[in-house]
Image (cartoon, grey):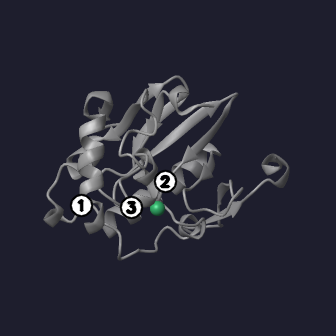
Amino acid sequence: MSPDAIDMVLLTHGDPDHIGGLLDRAGDLSYPRARYVLHEDLWNALNSAPTAGLYFPGQAAFVRRLATLIESRMILFDAPYAVTSGVQVVPAPGHRAGHTLYRFFSRGEALWHIGDAAFDPLFLERPELVIPTEYQPDVARATREALAQQASEEGAWIVGSHFRACDVGRLSPAGNTARFRWGTDEAANDP
Ligand SMILES: [Zn+2]
């Protein structure tokens, strides 16, 4: 598939390990024909002063260039909505400015890509844990609790940006606690 064939890019947040591939070495868009889907708070962060602390210090020139190039190609949102058939945008605040998860629906099943709402399934099994280095730690914890509860009720598959390769799983309630159990279906994960 050529980069020109990509017509939509879904952004979870603006950390360098998540948007660093959007520009090529020459500083042009890697996916020049795509629309870019992002939360209004992320757009504002990309346009903020470096002193606001909404992106990493070394990212300033990159985010300025990226913002200039995607401005006419954006789809901005600040609430859940269906961005295209079978793809739903859901703000998942706390980890970074404008952090967002994406729900995909196909053949009666749901897969949630939760970005960095949890670095590892452990943080979904124990959503009471607080990660002090997040942008808004208490908001991020509340987001994890809510998403773990809802994904568990819906039986949705979950994957995160930093989960181990092929670690796609589902949550089930862990007894009478506010915790969950992570389970992967080996057959379903078999490539
Ligand atoms: Zn990350």
Instruction: Give the mark, 1 or 3, whose residue is nearer the N terminus.
Output: 1
In the image, the residue with mark 3 has its CB under 8 Å from the nearest atom of ligand 1? no
Location of residue 181 (image quadrant): bottom right
Which residue: 45% across, 59% down? 17
In the image, the residue with mark 2 has its CB under 8 Å from the nearest atom of ligand 1? yes
Q: Nearer the viewer, mark 3 or mark 2?
A: 2
Crowdedness near tag 1: few (<14), some (14–19) or many (≥20) residues, C-alpha within 10 Å: many
Q: Position of residue 104 (x, y in %)?
A: 57, 36
Residue annotated with mark 2: 115
Task: Kindly state the secondary structure of the residue where label 2 is placed.
Answer: loop
Nearest the eye: 179 or 159 = 159
Residue annotated with mark 3: 142
Task: Kindly state the secondary structure of the residue where label 1 is placed.
Answer: loop
Which residue: 38% across, 46% down? 26
Q: Position of residue 19 (x, y in %)?
A: 41, 51
Q: Quadrant of the image for the N terminus? A: top right
Q: Could you tell whether 53 is left or right of 9 in the image?
A: left
Q: Is residue 82 above or below residue 158?
A: above
